Amino acid sequence: MARTYNFSAGPATLPLEVLEEAQRELLDYQGTGMSIMEHSHRGKAYMAVHEEAIANTKELLGLGDDYAVLFLQGGASLQFAMIPMNLLGAGQTADYTNSGSWAAKAIKEAKLLGHVNVAADCGKEIPTRVPLASEMNLTEGAAYVHITTNETISGAQWKSFPKTDAPLVADMSSDILSRPFNAQDFGLIYAGAQKNLAPAGMALVIMRKDLADRVPANVPSMLKYSTHIENDSMFNTCPCFTIYMYMLVTRWIKKTGLETLYARNVDKAARLYSAIDASDFYKGTAVPECRSDMNVTWRLPSEELEATFVKEALAEGFSGLKGHRSVGGIRASIYNAFPVEGVDALVSFMKDFEARNG
Ligand SMILES: *Cc1c(COP(=O)(O)O)cnc(C)c1O
């Protein structure tokens, strides 16, 4: 079987070992005579999966009982609305930083629901970057401060996180569990699963439980964090198969080690960025200090050449390299599960393409 080098931003490549294990267990989950997909979400077999998924998350992030780990539906996009619905009280202000398309979407939803201060805005700058902590114009007594740790579309990433008095809330959809960090500095972290964690179908939400005290009574039950904390993400039928895959992926991360994965991620990204920097033909689109280790973005001298590049790359077995439709260019998404061999193969393809077209 020839696996394609899948550079897609999401749904994205999953660890081969995890796919193989899921395949082995697909028809008969641990001798139960049925697939994990067919088990009741309240039965013993699935409950063990659910509990391990939570335990692995807490262990990887060093979190205790003061944090809840939730598996919610509606993707990261619903979190854009749930966060202000639950945490931004009447008369309060939430601080948001704008670093690009995803941050802008979070801001747009929050503005529908409450008062927002855009504390720093470099969302439209090219080359792209994230705000400096020193540029942030924070509100005293803010309900929370929201950042987007990795802009999946433009390829800009926060390398260190701001220290804030108000709870720090982060969209980590495209770089969660790609590097060690101090999770206890955050009030709430959320991530759509389909980039670095699992197949699509849920958002992982990690929150300090005391923040749930703020949830207004008139928020519908399904949209209240407190409902999901009280019911251990089982208020309604949870996305069992996605959580099962997430459990296998977190097991794989634990076995590999977060530090090891991080070193690998930095190394993979460095190989691509040095290929870009070594050429006048390719031009990186992010400010070097903010270059993402997860989504590497660059341009060719013309859109025509970019289209040819994507087409020829696909014929060579590299899929998903076309930049997001809103910005164009080339994007190579190289999450945890993406193999270094694929990066090296792409680098040789880039050299060859430049030699023929440069
Ligand atoms: C993909 C992505 C989202 C949206 O995720 P969905 O699960 O599709 O709603 C939000 N934020 C970031 C940073 C993303 O990369």
Image (tube, rainbow, N blue to C red):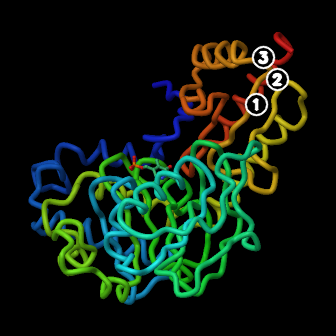
Tell me the kind of residue under disc 2.
Lys
Quick one: quadrant of the N terminus?
Answer: top left
Q: How far apart, in angstroms, are the residues tagged by discs 2 and 3?
A: 5 Å
Is 40 situated left or right of 105 in this image? left
Q: How far apart, in angstroms, are the residues tagged by discs 2 and 1?
A: 6 Å
Quick one: quadrant of the C terminus?
Answer: top right
In the image, which disc is placed on residue 353?
3
Q: Position of residue 303 (x, y in %)?
A: 69, 18
Q: Position of residue 21 (x, y in %)?
A: 35, 48
- Foreground: 340 or 104? 104
Q: Residue furthest front?
A: 91
User: Does any portion of residue 271 appear in the rendered image?
Assistant: yes
Is 277 situated left or right of 267 in this image? right
Secondary structure beneath disc 3? helix
Q: Residue at x 35, y 65 (%)?
A: 113
Q: Residues within 10 Å of mark 3 (few under 14, many from 20)?
A: some
Q: Residue at x 75, y 18 (%)?
A: 302
Q: Residue at x 32, y 85 (%)?
A: 214
Residue annotated with mark 1: 347
Whether tag 2 and tag 1 are in contact, CB under 8 A, the answer is: yes
Tell me the kind of residue under disc 3.
Phe
